[in-house]
């Protein structure tokens, strides 16, 4: 199949004027699975799977003034070639009720940029959806995993306080309480004086990862949702 023909298959579902599959579209061609992949949970005596933190609902935190509903669903928080130190955050969302991972939980994630500014401040007010920057939604997979790429946000002044670098989270899952919280970074000099960060147990360590293309920071941030009221 020529590349143009293959791209035509993808285009069959991407028309902005319709939610219907094009009449002449055909199923995407499959390739043989030559790897004989078996998921470790299907193996005999699978390893115990537990969250990174202790079994207790995740610490709540403030929503902050910069949340906007309806962010796009995507796996990259920042625009392409955004200045700053590349960061990958991954983790799992867990149920405190069942002690198992939560599939299809919805996460809102938003943050400041490398200068400590939100898209509000660049746009001069609440941005329209097409101008959303540094904010996404994403959905956990069938085993509760999520992952996104971003840059490490900067700290910023808020009145008399300097807020430490942080990333905002809002989580929702069927049968569970909505959770609003933030993650912080170990070693941030502004944590101790921050009214919220100084009381938070959600301070993560970052590892510097090297590969053939360069280096990036990586962190793990698991969350545990409490039951519904």
Image (cartoon, rainbow, N blue to C red):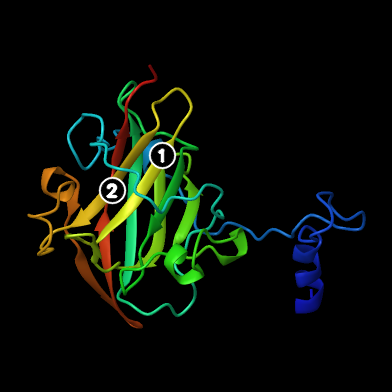
Going by the picture, which residue comes out furthest to the top? Answer: 229
Write down the quadrant of residue 155 in the picture.
bottom left
220 vs 199: above or below: below
Which one is in front, 84 or 6?
Answer: 84
The quadrant where residue 33 appears? bottom right
Inter-mark Cα distance, 2 to 1: 11 Å
Q: Quadrant of the C terminus?
A: top left
Q: Tell which circle, 2 or 1, labels the residue nearer the N-terminal end.
A: 1
Q: Is residue 186 visible in this depiction of the protein?
A: yes
- Residue found at the far right of this picture: 23
Circle 2 sits on which residue? 182
Residue pictured at 84% horizontal, 53% vertical: 18
Q: Dot 2, how many residues are within 10 Å of its Cα: few (below 14), some (14-19), or many (20+)? A: many
**Secondary structure type for disc 1:** strand
Task: Please name the residue shown 12% across and 56% down the image.
Answer: 191
Q: Secondary structure at mark 2?
A: strand
**Percent x, y of residue 99:** 30, 26
The residue that mark 1 highlights is 171
Q: Which residue is at the far bottom?
A: 213
């Amino acid at each position: 199949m020529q590349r143009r023909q293959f791209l035509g298959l993808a285009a069959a579902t991407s028309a902005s004027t319709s939610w219907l599959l094009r009449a002449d579209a055909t199923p995407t061609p499959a390739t043989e699975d030559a790897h004989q992949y078996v998921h470790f949970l299907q193996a005999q005596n699978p390893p115990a799977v537990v969250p990174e933190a202790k079994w207790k609902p995740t610490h709540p935190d403030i929503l902050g003034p910069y949340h906007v509903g309806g962010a796009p669903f995507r796996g990259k928080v920042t625009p392409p070639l955004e200045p700053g130190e590349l960061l990958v955050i991954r983790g799992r969302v867990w149920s405190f009720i069942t002690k198992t991972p939560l599939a299809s939980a919805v996460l809102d994630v938003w943050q400041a940029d490398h200068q400590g500014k939100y898209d509000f401040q660049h746009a001069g007010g609440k941005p329209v959806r097409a101008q959303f920057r540094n904010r996404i939604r994403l959905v956990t997979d069938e085993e509760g995993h999520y992952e996104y790429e971003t840059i490490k946000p900067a700290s910023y002044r808020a009145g008399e306080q300097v807020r430490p670098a942080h990333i905002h989270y809002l989580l929702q899952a069927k049968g569970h309480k909505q959770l609003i919280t933030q993650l912080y970074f170990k070693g941030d000099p502004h944590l101790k004086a921050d009214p919220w960060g100084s009381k938070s147990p959600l301070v993560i360590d970052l590892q510097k990862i090297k590969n053939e293309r360069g280096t990036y920071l990586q962190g793990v941030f698991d969350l545990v949702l409490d039951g519904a009221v």
